[in-house]
Image (cartoon, rainbow, N blue to C red):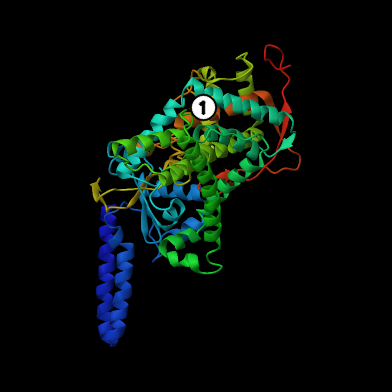
Amino acid sequence: MKRHKVEIFFVLTLLLLLGLTKWARIGLSSLQILFSLAVISLIIHEIYWKRRKLPNGPIPWLTLGNMATLATANFDDLMSKWRRKYGGIFTVWIGPFPLVMVNDVGTMKKYFVQNGELFSNRWRNFVTDSFMNGANGLIQIDGEKWREQRRFSLHVLRNFGVGQHRMERKILSEVRHLTSYLQKNGEIDLCTPLAVCVGNIINDMLFGITFPQGSIEMKRLHSLLDAQSKLVVNPLMGLYIAAPFATKIPFLNKPWLELIKHRDHLWDFLGKQVQSHIEMFNNGHSTIDDFTFAYLEEMDRRKEIGETGYFNEWQLQMLLLDLFFAGMETTVTTLKWAFLLMITHPVVMKNVQKELDCLNVSEVGLRERSLTPYTQAVICEIQRIANILPINLLRTVCDDVEIDGYTFPKGTMVIPQISIMLNDETVFEEPKEFRPERFLDDEGKLKRIDQFMPFSLGRRQCLGESLARAELFLIFSNVIKEFDILPVPGEIYSRKRALGLTVSPQKYRVHLVPRKLDTNMNPV
């Protein structure tokens, strides 16, 4: 790879010398020669000089980088093509910004686990700072503030039973509300009922509130998150990052105004939750029964000892925003893919039902997870096919880094591009095919595949992984056990992807038919 760069530089230098010789012969003016030199210098800088110490990758266009190719090609296919051509690590240019994509397991572990301290900062920009009012929350912060807030969040979530029987009871309670609601509806878009089910689990944990199935307020909140997810990947966001003044230009700033409107609605909802908790806390509420009360108690404790750290009301509100989004959007999106894939693969659904029926239980719990390897394999394959984060959340290096012969200046975006691995044909044969069996060994047991890491890895691995795994298993298996999920006549079921921060399927409706089971929970 380094040899190719040297060859490119040699060719460009030779062309420059030949050009100077020719210009001198034909008598171009000094101004014309200077202009030509400037153009050639720019070309040399763009296609060689700025790239020389970074991993190889597609040659960028002047100023635009590789944006034109990214905007016009199928993203998954393009990433797989570049991986085959450039290997397990390559650089893509987002305008003037290099984005180093690591899609090799060994390199990922070396960079993001062994050297996680160096490769785990976040990329701050005008858009994220505007949405979070600076470096706040959990996702877009780093350094000591991130360590403090993540450590506290993990501690509180564990206290509230994440990964334990207490959380299982809460999930199953919401699953019962969901299946009861679905019993009354034949043809339905599952998106909103799923959002209420998953949303209530995280809402109860964060704020101590839940919404009934059919709730208009919960539908509004999910719509805000969904709209936000789509807006942040609008190509104009790149313009706003590079030239913030564009947010003031009429017509050009329409996506920006929409994003800020949705942000303000979310801020308003979260602000009301925080303020109501503060009032109760100040009036003597002493039961720490949700995340917000736990945070307020920690703020109060720190004030008493004079060590507030990064704990304050605004940081709490933005932390709640991150946890609310992460705890709802990703799981709901994965479940939307799950039931779409069951419609288009009815044999797989029947096989899942057959395995679940053998349990002879009225309700599938986490204790049954080890007894259902096929169901688990189906969920893994759903996550792989759904591939809901086409570009992993951006990480940056915290300081100038030299590793593997590359030099990464401070602030360079270097991310574990897990989505590429999920489509790697050398690991997943015919990756576009839905084949749950690829996650089973010869004895029918669930097997581990190193390239399958849907919750990321390293210091930025998903905070709520155990909760999300429990939700996916309990919601998916109990709905499949209760219903046959059939296509609606005339409805189109496509795996075409609706791009956003998370990638959803196109909207679809299903026809739900309650399954008839006897007293031993076997199909009649």
Kindly identify the residue that appears in the image at 60 percent across and 33 percent down.
Answer: 197
Q: Residue furthest top?
A: 520
Kindly identify the residue that appears in the image at 41 percent across and 58 percent down.
Answer: 126
Is 513 on the left or on the right of 154, as rendered?
right
Amino acid type, callout 1: Ala
Residue 211 image-quadrant placement: top right
Is 91 on the left or on the right of 260, as rendered?
left
Label 1: which residue?
470
Is 150 on the left or on the right of 197, as rendered?
left
x, y (%) of residue 307? 29, 39
Viewer-proximal residue among 273 and 9? 273
x, y (%) of residue 97? 37, 58
Q: Is residue 262 above or below residue 326?
A: below
**Mark 1, residues whose alpha carbon is within 10 Å: few (<14), some, or many (≥20)?**
many
Q: Is residue 79 above or below residue 283?
A: below
Is 224 on the left or on the right of 91, as rendered?
right
Q: Is residue 156 above or below residue 388?
A: above
